[in-house]
Amino acid sequence: MHTFMFALLVAALPLVPYPQYVKEERGSFNASGAHVVASAKASELSAAVINEFAEQYALNGSERNRISFRLRPSMPEEAYAIKVRKHVVKIHASSNRGFVYAIQTLKQLLTASNEIPCVTIKDSPRFGYRGMHLDCARKYYSVDFIKKYLDIMAFHKLNVFHWHLTDDHGWRLEIKKYPRLVEVGAFGNIGSRADFDSLAPYPVEYEGYYTQDDVREVVEHAAKLGINVIPEIDLPGHMTAAMAAYPWLGCTGGPYEVIHVVGPRGKGLARDSLCPGKESTFEFIEDVLAEVMSIFPGKYIHLGGDECIKDRWAECPECCALVDSLGLQDNELGTKWQQLEVWMINRLSEFLAENGRKAIVWDEMLEGALGGNATVMSWRGVETGIKAAKRGYDVIMCPVSRAYFDYSQSGFYDKEPKAFAGIVPIDSVYFYDPQMGLSEAEAKHVIGAQANMWCDVIGSEEYVEYMLLPRLAAFSEVQWCKLDNKDWGRFKSSMDVVRNYYDANGYIYARHLWGVIGLPGYDSPIEN
């Protein structure tokens, strides 16, 4: 895997994200053929994770050197502790997640000669929500790639996968009661085309959808890695694919076409959105959400709420009548039509709450009297997240300027594959603090942070990996490390070792930190 200079005990261990407490000792543990023991009280899932680790590194052997996984219920849910001595490694955790994180740390500590330096580590995350997003509506990515994506997330100790499954450009999720959603929304001239990019000449998939059995397979794989999967059914805007399948969902009755966009944003946002003035619209959404809840067991469902164009609502008799009956008016938060959208989201949030779930919405929903059951995902900037926290909402920070990984990693546009018109370099990612600008009391409402991977332009699986890594490593320290435990110099030095793990697993990653720019095969040295 990598080499370690034991003489340099004053240097930080090459770990990303860096643990909260590290004490290095003299000597090392030889893991070659070590005997792995899992606590009899560990869950079936934890036992499977531990056994997989032992088999992957051929560790089930000698009784002399032991790696022991012990359940410690008194520890926090995501905490773990590692004590490495010359003949024994002891790992303590109270849950599967703790064991998963301990294993990821051991993978980074394990040298090419199967040595683990003697060390004591006590670790737990700064934030409880540590997310990564992937847009599979504009591009279809295989189940195998989704699982690979989850593996990469787990290595960096993330615990939430935000799966964007529906949009104007495609509907990727099987809903048995409404089969035309995928029959129309997953095939044909759909998606946001990226195959024009000469610097990303890999196959790009536009057609395809995920069956409910596919979803269960992804959710099961995620659970093993300690990752919750949050599906997004983006509404009431970004619903052209659904309206193309069932035109009665729109104000005009159609016909509608799934949007085919050439390049970023193409011709702009769709003018048509779901019609809130028809009760049949809510019957459809609740039917869809019922099936979604049956296959996604997690607490959260993302309802979207972003970039909704409301032109048709103002022309729709049913919508106008509903606005009048509700007594909605323009106010300091937003227009009456914005109030109508927030009312719609509130109604659906209550439906989720009645079924034991909780809604996440984009920050546009702050432009109305958003209900208290919703968690706000702040994307348009840091300011919207601050506003949400000050109003008492739980907040997930993912500002476009720091956490949008579809933006270029550098300003070398002639050498980079096509990207959105912006730059989010790795150092800008690293130095972001999700709680900046908030008082101590307000900061408690920031439950975590997330990075987003939109695929308006990004097409291939290789290109996704290139845009993801190593920025995800930097973002993992934003999510995991306490502020006084972060150090840019230590992080960069550690990445010299972490990249060996990327190489060993065949991951494509950007190499700006090492003076090279561009996808493999199209790369070149960075000129100073």
Image (cartoon, helix red, strand yellow):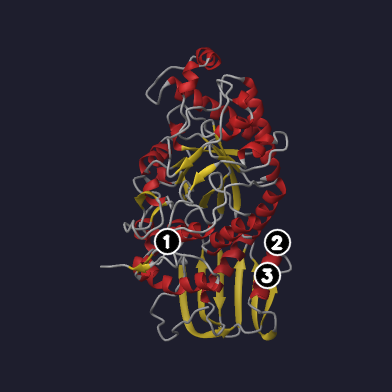
Q: What residue did someone put label 1 on?
A: 474
Give the mark nearest the N terminus, 1 or 2. 2
Of the residues under marks 2 and 3, which one precedes in the sequence?
Answer: 2
Disc on the earlier residue, 1 or 3:
3
How far apart are the two marked residues, 1 and 3, measured between alpha carbons?
27 Å
What is the secondary structure assignment of the residue under circle 3? Answer: helix
Place of residue 155 in the rendered image (x, y in percent of width and height, measured from the top left): 54, 64
Mark 2 burial class by Cα count in 10 Å: few <14, some 14-19, many 20+: some
Judged by depth in the image, the label closer to the viewer, 1 or 2, is 1
Q: Which residue is mark 2?
A: 45
Residue 165 marker: none
- In this picture, residue 218 sits left or right of residue 195: right
Quarter of the image for residue 518 reads: bottom left
Dot 3: few (<14), some (14–19), or many (≥20) neighbours within 10 Å? few
The residue nearer to you, when weighing 134 against 295, is 134
Q: Position of residue 458 (x, y in %)?
A: 47, 52
State which mark lies toward you, 2 or 3.
Answer: 3
Residue 52 circle label = 3
The C terminus, quarter of image: bottom left
Q: Residue at x 66, y 34 (%)?
A: 288
**Which residue shows up at 66% across the image and 58% down it?**
221
Q: CA distance from mark 2 to mark 3?
A: 11 Å
Q: Secondary structure at mark 1?
A: helix
Q: Residues within 10 Å of mark 1 (few under 14, many from 20)?
A: many
Q: Compared to 239, does 434 lie above or below?
A: below
- Type of the residue with mark 3: Glu
Give the amino acid at mark 1.
Ala
Seen at 61% across and 65% down, the residue is 99
Measured as percent of width and height from the top left, residue 211 is found at 69, 46
